[in-house]
Amino acid sequence: MSKGKLEKFAEVEGFKHVVQPKLEEVFRKDYFLKGKWNSDFFQNNGPITLELGCGKGEYTVGLAKMYPDRNFLGVDIKGARIWKGAKQSHEEGLKNVGFLRTRIDFINSFFTQDEVDEIWFTFPDPQLKKPLKRLTSSRFLNYYSQFLRPGGWINLKTDSEVLFHYTKKLAEFNKLEIAVASEDIYGSGIADEILSIRTFYEKTWLEQGLRSHYIRFMLNNNQPVTELPDEE
């Protein structure tokens, strides 16, 4: 491991707004903050938005600046990635930002029913060869339905045409409400202040001529999501 990564890991350890559970604290059991993120972590009653697979946390921090009355939690397994957003939010004194280092597979160990208001995915791994590992697959959407409040939106911003069309097709197949579905948010003119937040990866891909796709949809919490027949 490089010296730079070791230094970042050491610095992250000192940030009180970064949660790094051990495996034995979440494997087949509930983490102690489950149901208590507002009271014990953020110490307010603001709605909670998750950025799953947050990378460097650009969206987590960017949204937190725009909405100081809401809470934002970036989730990623890579501590060296989380470091950037954690350091920035610490230095800027943002009280409505937190980071959780864990695998998304364990996400239900952390949140209880209706505890989360909204979910974002910004340029996640499209898992081209393993559809069921996609963060918008039926498997994961059914995880999220256990803690996302009724009427809570799911947002996907991606450069992957495969992931965008897969997610759109899955939502349509399950008759989920789709508010927006765009293959080119900048070319179509729908890129508002929120959608114009650009991650490190997006900036790189835009320079390469790739387009940014976006879909915003809502789960039907009373009905499990069924996988596309050709992806099972």
Image (cartoon, rainbow, N blue to C red):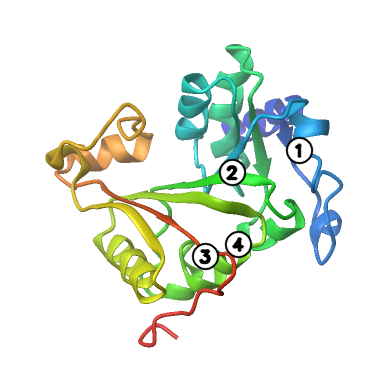
Measured in 3D between alpha carbons, the distance from the residue under mark 3 to the one under mark 2, in whole angstroms, is: 14 Å
Helix or strand or loop: what does disc 3 sit on? loop
Residue 180 position, x and y percent, is 29, 50
Graded by Cα atoms within 10 Å as few (under 14), some (14 to 19) or many (20 or more), the crowding at tag 3 reads some
Graded by Cα atoms within 10 Å as few (under 14), some (14 to 19) or many (20 or more), the crowding at tag 4 reads many
Graded by Cα atoms within 10 Å as few (under 14), some (14 to 19) or many (20 or more), the crowding at tag 2 reads many
Disc 3 target residue: 220
Q: Is residue 70 above or below residue 212?
A: above
Residue 168 position, x and y percent, is 32, 65
Measured in 3D between alpha carbons, the distance from the residue under mark 3 to the one under mark 1, in whole angstroms, is: 24 Å
Helix or strand or loop: what does disc 4 sit on? loop
* Residue depth check, mark 3 versus mark 2: number of the one nearer the observer: 3
Asked whether the viewer can see residue 2, the reply is no
Measured in 3D between alpha carbons, the distance from the residue under mark 4 to the one under mark 1, in whole angstroms, is: 18 Å
Give amino acid for label 4: Ser
Q: Do the residues labelled 4 and 1 touch (CB within 8 Å)?
A: no
| Relative side of 92 to 183, left or right | right
Measured in 3D between alpha carbons, the distance from the residue under mark 2 to the one under mark 4, in whole angstroms, is: 11 Å
Of residues 10 and 158, the one nearer the viewer is 158
Q: Is residue 65 above or below residue 188?
A: above
Disc 1 target residue: 37
| Relative side of 41 to 104, left or right | right
Q: Which residue lies furthest to the top in this view?
A: 92
Q: Are marks 2 and 1 in contact (CB under 8 Å)?
A: no
Question: Residue 75 appears in which quarter of the rendering?
Answer: top right
| Relative side of 150 to 232, left or right | right
**Sequence order check, earlier mark of 2 and 4:** 2
* Residue depth check, mark 2 versus mark 1: number of the one nearer the observer: 2
**Sequence order check, earlier mark of 3 and 1:** 1
Disc 4 target residue: 145
**Sequence order check, earlier mark of 4 and 1:** 1
Q: Which mark is residue 117?
A: 2
